[in-house]
Image: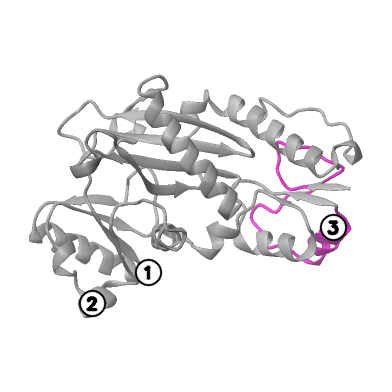
Amino acid sequence: MILSYHPCFEADTNLLCAGREPDENDRAAMRAADAVVLPQGCRETLYRMARQNCRHVFPNYDMRFQYPGKTGQARLFRAMNVPHPPTRVYDDTTHFEKCGIPDKDASVPLVFKLDWGGEGETVVLLQSVSDLARALSRAATFEQSGQRGFVLQRFVAHDRTLRVVVIGQNLSAYWRIQDDSAAFGTSLRSGARIDKQSDPDLRHKALVLARQFCERTHINLAGFDFIFDASGRWKSDPLPLFLEINYFFGRTGLGGSASFYDMLREAIDSWLKELELVGRRAPRDTMAGKQS
């Protein structure tokens, strides 16, 4: 029996857990299931219950909850020994006051990232000591409401990032290019445009790294952001650097929400087929178009 909590994937049994904590009825359903399909926005309590009570769960969010936020991602990149910009992780402003910034990492520009937030909304380019003071003051304000943690990262000059989207076993990549030289950030919100054709060799290098990373971490639904270091010995052969992992990511570069849900359903069907469970799932009426 296949149990689905995803509103766009019908299975033998379909439940929703939006706006509530999972309960004993959910636990019983998971124990009876051969596989559980969870929504992209699944909360940790639902995921933990599914992992504890069913052998097969999609998506695999082990790394998302073991290494949460931007501070967790920095620690994960370090633990996996993958190329990424030099990054200092701070639990809060008190931790920063105690540890400071090592001299080798202290020169500006630096990138300051709060532990949460997407589309670059909590990312700031620091070009002076006063910029750092303002960023720390902002972090201290958030700490009053319980939101803690930030990273300081060496700035790598770039006018584009490569988004690698992982959906099951399928990986695709596209550039987000910022044409405005005065703007910082390459999110679509900040005015970047999408390019799916340029520099296929660089795209291939990042895709290989992302696939290897996913094989080691078992991540199967996420958007990875890469930048390329073309300084020093990498000038003629730019090195892809892991920048962030986005477990919630935009769909514009994938052709929109309808296209994304088609790819997601195909990925789940392939996953079930590999588990030899696809024949045990009741036929479904696809829900394309019911959610944007």
Q: Residue at x 53, y 25 (%)?
A: 256
What x and y, as percent, mark residue 259?
60, 25
Give the CA distance from mark 3 to mark 1.
36 Å
Residue at label 3? 29
Mark 1 Cα-neighbour bin, 10 Å: few <14, some 14–19, many ≥20: few
Disc 2 element: helix
Q: Which residues are magenta?
A: 4-33
Viewer-closest of 167 and 42: 167
Q: Is residue 70 visible?
A: yes
**Hey, what amino acid is under mark 1?**
Ser
Whether label 3 touches label 2, CB < 8 Å:
no
Viewer-closest of 24 and 79: 79
| Numbered disc in front, either 2 or 1 | 2
Q: Residue at x 49, y 43 (%)?
A: 210
Which of the two labelled residues, at mark 3 and mark 1, occupies the earlier sequence position? 3
Which of the two labelled residues, at mark 3 and mark 2, occupies the earlier sequence position? 3
Q: What secondary structure characterizes most of the magenta part? A: loop
**Hey, what amino acid is under mark 2?**
Cys
**Hey, what amino acid is under mark 3?**
Ala
Which of the two labelled residues, at mark 2 and mark 1, occupies the earlier sequence position? 2
Whether label 2 touches label 1, CB < 8 Å:
no
Query: Is residue 225 found inside the magenta-colored segment of the image?
Result: no
Residue at label 2? 99
Residue at label 1? 145
Give the CA distance from mark 2 to mark 1.
23 Å
